[in-house]
Amino acid sequence: MHDIVPRRAAAVYTLNLRVFWPLVTCLCTALLCLCQALRGRAAGEGAAEAGAVPLLPGSALLLLGYLLARYRGAAGGGWRRRGPGPGPGPGAAPRAAAAAAARRGLLEGFYARQLRLSPHVLGHSKAHVGRVVGELVRAAKAQGLQPGPLALSLRGDFVRIGSAYEQHKVRSPDCFDVLVPLRLPPRLEAEARCATGPGLPAGPRGAFVCGLAAPGWPRQYRAFAEGFCAELQGRRLLSSALVLRWFQGHLQRCLGAVRYRLQERCRVRLTAGPGRPPTLLLQPRSDHLCCHLSMAVRLIPAIPLGDSLYLTAPPEEPCATRPDALWGLNASRQEQRLLSWLKEQAPASSCHLKCLQILKGLRDLRGQRLAEPFCSQWGRVLSSYVLKTALFSLLLRGPLEAWDEQFLVERLEELVMFLRDCLRKQVLMHLFLGNTALPEALALPRFLKEAAPVNLLAAFDGPTLDLAACLLLDTWNQAPRVVAACSGPRHRWWAPTPCRHAAEPSLELQGE
């Protein structure tokens, strides 16, 4: 590939007062002397002596003008040759290159020391989570079949979602998210629609209600409707709060069998709070578990809609007027397909996931230095889902070749500027809901294409988003200083210890 030499701009010369005024002074003095000499020859020697007196004041005035001009033009340049506009000095380019190299080295070190996960440790952790959750789900499914056909039950499988399974988790593999699909009674089907109308505002990710349809509904399913449904706008809708309450109690009752089978390897405990999915806490007992990691697994009940779409209880605060009817839409499977498609299309050394991880790390570093109440708002405005959506939107603009590893700093800066513009405009649209511009290779479900578009930033006010945009840009500009200040032993995050299973093959389960 031949080098491209830019065309040289036309030379523009500027006036240097330090050179100009001495020349003018000398020229005027010479002209006056010449005139005086000519007068002396014409009028005689006596007139020449009389005319010699005004020559001294004229020369003095010219000298004074020269000194004044020299004083005012001391800041001027020479007869310099320059480009069309004021450009950097001759040493600016090397300094800029050195600064860019230093920034890249600092970010690479920050990623390697504090953000990057060991694939081996992550593989052990995911395998252990899959084994424990699988046993719990199977036990809960077996017990759920006993009450009768007109009740909720577990389908028997689970869906791994979140950053740990999308290869952009940071710091340590100690938190995981798992969807647990539920089974409705026979011949009862879920119908999701956007939550519109009084008392049902759309949340940051959109809000949905889940209707139910079946022959003879609700007469034949009266017991199910009384236990799991709420009435809203004259319709019986599946209640996310009631389903979540049943799910928590059901798992707690089934935990005994799992705890007995796993008691030699780890301690298992289930925690649940009001309005939140239960969390399974795993604490190792022996050296069997890799690196002695204590893990938290969030178990999220999900209503299947088909096409790998699920309704889940929204993680945000529910609506105060009708909290029971709202659901959130989970399209994690489509996000994983998009990530796989981008991995195939992008260069082998693409840095898009590393950019996302570094931006997460910078966000967390800046969040540690913020005071409430904006500290919590900072984490919600720049949530991992918002950052991931911004990255997806930027990647789909192309070209993907520009995301090669050598352009890490440029792409990271582009991502920060794109996100800053979204915050200033207060608009960042959901990538899948109502977006018809996605690649056809993804084969999105019709439900997503026909859904109403959702603005992920609609729940935040303008001043909050403007402040977040300013702090985001300042965080990027001060990234070397912030990273260097937080790289000492007191600020260093968890780092995995050497594992004795490093030479063994990965313990990944089938289907992981």
Image: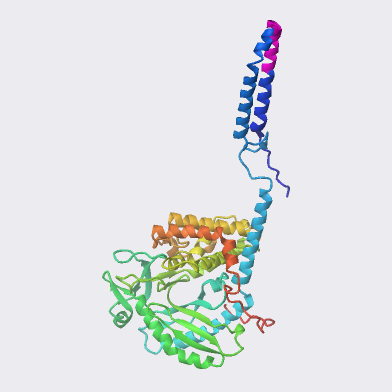
Q: Nearer the viewer, residue 129 or 453?
A: 129
Image coordinates of residue 159 in percent, x first then y, are 50, 76
In magenta, the rendered stretch is 31-45
Image coordinates of residue 386 in percent, x first then y, are 48, 64
Left or right? Give the position of 341 relative to 258: right
Q: Is residue 228 magenta?
A: no
Residue drawn 64% across and 65% down? 108
Quick check: 14 above or below 142? above
Whether residue 353 can be seen here: no
Which residue, as the protein is rendered here, is positioned at the far right?
2
Left or right? Give the position of 363 relative to 63: left
Quick check: 69 above or below 358? above
Q: Is residue 35 magenta?
A: yes
For the C terminus, the image quarter is bottom right
Which residue, as the protein is rendered here, is positioned at the far left?
234
Q: Nearer the viewer, residue 441 or 170?
A: 170
> Main SS type for the magenta part?
helix
Image coordinates of residue 71 in percent, x first then y, are 61, 34
Quick check: 54 above or below 312? above
Q: Nearer the viewer, residue 98 or 379?
A: 98
